[in-house]
Amino acid sequence: MNKLKVKAGNLPESPGVYIMKDSDKNVIYVGKAKILKRRVSQYFMESQKHSDKVKKMVSNIEDFDYIMTDSEFEALVLECSLIKRHKPKYNILLKDGKGYSYIKVTNEKWPRILYVKQKTDEGALYFGPYVNSFYVKNLAGEVINIFKLPTCNRNFSKAKSQPCLNYYINKCAAPCLGNMPAEEYKFLIDEAVSFIKNGSNNTIEYLNKEMLKASENLNFEKAANIRDRIKSIRTVIKDKQKVVSNKIKDQDVIAIAANKQKASVHVFRFENGNLYDTENFVFDFFDDEISLRTEFIKRYYDLKGYVPKNITLDGNIENLDLIKKWLSKIGGKNVKILMPSKGDLFKLVQMCKSNAYEVFKCDSNDNKSYLLEDLKNLLSLDTVPLYIEAYDISNLQGSDNVGGMVVFYNTQPLKSEYKRFKIKSIDHQDDYNSIREVMSRRIKNYKENKISDTGFGKLPDLILVDGGFGQTSAAKEIFAKEEIYVPIFGMVKDGGHRTRAITTHDKEIDISKNQELFSFITRVQDEVHRYTIGYHKMLRNKRVKGSILTNIPGVGKKRASLLLKKFGSIKNISSASAEELLFVEGITKPCAGSIYDYFQSSDNI
C-alpha cells in the first residue's frame, strides 16, 4: 500500500485515465480524472471514508497504469473505450441481452397467437423480427385480450370440456365448450391478424362495417360481439395514452431505487410520446446514487449507441456539462438532461422510480431491515422499530364501537399477536376517547403481564395510530400519564382515504420521497383498518341476527346466542324442526315450538 501511495503521489497533475490491476495483472477498474495525482492518491489515503465497494477494490490492487490526455473530455471517451475492452470487475457493466422477437400465428386447425424469440420452419405465420421485446409482448397480449383468444394448450377438436377462469371473467371465447365452429374461430384469428398488420384505427373502421352488416342481416349476437371488440380496442388505445409525455415526445426517463444492499435502475424509453420500451438493471455494489447514476449513463449509452434528444433523471450526476457534451457527440445531436421537481415530467420520473422499487418487492429473499433503519432516521427514534403496533377505531354512528391492534415484526405482519377491543366506556362516536380507552387497557395489560415479556407483556418499539393530530395526542396523553415512554405517531390519509403522511401531535412528516417506506406505512395502515373494520362488521352482524331472534317470545339474548352457536346462521335456525331445536341447551319444548312457529310464518322468513 505504501508503494502504491508513493507511486500515486508522483503522478502528473493533468487529465487522464487510470487502470487498476490485481496480482494476476487483470484490469479490475478503469477511471477517469481531471487531475490524475489527486484522484488516484485518494484511494490510498486512510483518512478517506470509502464505501465497501471501494475498500474491497483497493484491497485487491497490486499495481496501476495511467494514460494522460489533453482534456477531461478525452479522458471520458478513453475511459468508456477501455471499460468496453477490458470489462473490469469493479466498474458498472451492462449487457444488452435483447435479441429479436416475433409474433407467431400457429399453423393448425385452431391457430394460436404467441410471443416467441425465434422462428422455426413449421408453416406458421410470423410478424417480425422486432428488436423491441417490450413492444411485441404488449402487442401479443393486447391482441389476445381484444379478440378473447385462448392462452391454454387444450385440443378444441375433442369433446367439450369445463372452461377455465378466463371464460368466466370474459377474457376468452372458450372454444373448449364445443359450441364455436372452427370457421367462426378462424374469423376471430383473421381479425386479430388484420389488427396486427393494419393497426387499431383501420381495424376499428373495418369492424364498424362488419357490425353494421351483421345488424342489417338481423344477426344481433354477432353485431354485439363485434361491438365489444371495438370497445376493447378503444380501451387499449385510451390506456396507452395514459403513459404519454405531451411536452417531450422523444426521451429516456431514468430512476434509481436503492437500499443498503443493492440498487435497481429503471429506464422508460419514449418515442413520439409513447412508451415503447422499458429496462431494469440491478447492482449489488455501488458508492452512492449520484456516482451510480453517472456511471450508469456512461455505460448505458456507450452500449446502446443511440441517444435521444432528452434524458430525464431523478437526481443529480457528476460532471453534468461533460456528460452532456459526450452524449451529444455519440448521439450526433444536442442532448438535454432534465431533472424535474414538479409537473408531468416529475410524475413520470416518480412512476419510473416506483417500477424500480418493484424489483425489491419481487425479491422474496430481500432483507427489509434497511426499511426500518430508514423509518428510525425519519422519525428520529432511539432504536430501530423492529416490533411495531398499529391501532384503529371503527364504528357506525357510534354503535358497535371497537378498536383493533395489529403487529408488524421486522416489516412482516405477526398475526398471532393481533388484538381486538370492544369499547366499553363510549356509546357514541368519539374516536379520541375510544383511543384513550384502548391505550389505557393496553397499559393495564402490560403491567399485569410484563413479567412474561410476551404478548401484552412487552412494549413495542413504535406505536402507529390510524388518524391525525387528535388521535395521536390522545394516545400520547395516556402513555405520558402512566410515565411509560413509547414513540407514538399517527398515519394520516388524504381525501381519497389513501395514506398521505406520518404525523406527530402537531406536525406532519412527509414520507412520499421514500417510495418503499411509503408503501410499507400504507400496508400497515390498510392492514389495521381491515382487521378493525372486520371485527366491527362481525359484531354488527351478530347484533342484527340476535335482534331477529329476540323478537321471538321466550327468546332472550342468552338463548339467541346459544342458538346461533349451535346452528351457525339464522337460515339454519329457520330450517330446523322443533325436535332439532330442543337439542340446544336452555331451549324448552314451548320455546322450541315458539321458534318453529315464528319461522313458518312467511312474513318472518
Image (spheres, grey):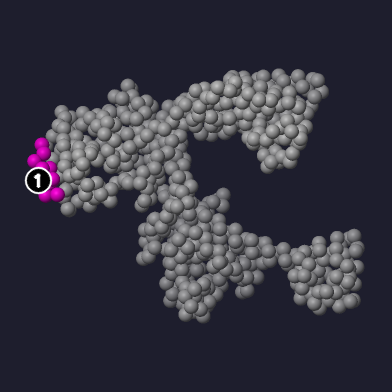
Q: Quadrant of residue 210?
A: top right
One can see residue 539 in this view: yes
Q: Within 10 angstroms of label 1, few (less than 14), some, or many (20 or more) residues?
A: few
The quarter of the picture where the C terminus appears is bottom right
In the image, 521 versus 168, the foreground residue is 168
Secondary structure of the residue carrying tag 1 is helix
Relative to 557, is 506 above or below? above
Q: Which residue is mark 1?
A: 6
Q: Magenta span: helix, strand or loop, mainly? A: helix
Residue 130 at x, y percent in the picture: 49, 24
Q: Which residue is painted at 80% across and 77% down in the image?
A: 585
Q: At 64% from the left edge and 61% from the top edge, which residue is drawn? A: 534
Total residue callouts: 1
Instruction: Identify the amino acid type marked 1.
Output: Val
Asked which quadrant contains residue 596, the reply is bottom right
- Residue 279 or residue 323, whichever sits in front: 279
Relative side of 269 to 186, left or right: left
Q: Say whether residue 11 is magenta.
A: yes
Report x, y in % for residue 306.
Answer: 37, 25
The residue shown at (55%, 22%) is 121
Where is 505 relative to 517, above or below?
below
83 on left or right of 216: left
Q: Which residues are magenta?
A: 1-12
Quarter of the image for residue 238 reads: top right
Question: Relative to residue 92, is residue 268 drawn left or right?
Answer: right
Q: Is residue 169 visible?
A: no
Q: Is residue 401 magenta?
A: no
Q: Position of residue 220 (x, y in %)?
A: 79, 27
Instruction: Name the foreground residue: 510 vs 300.
Output: 300
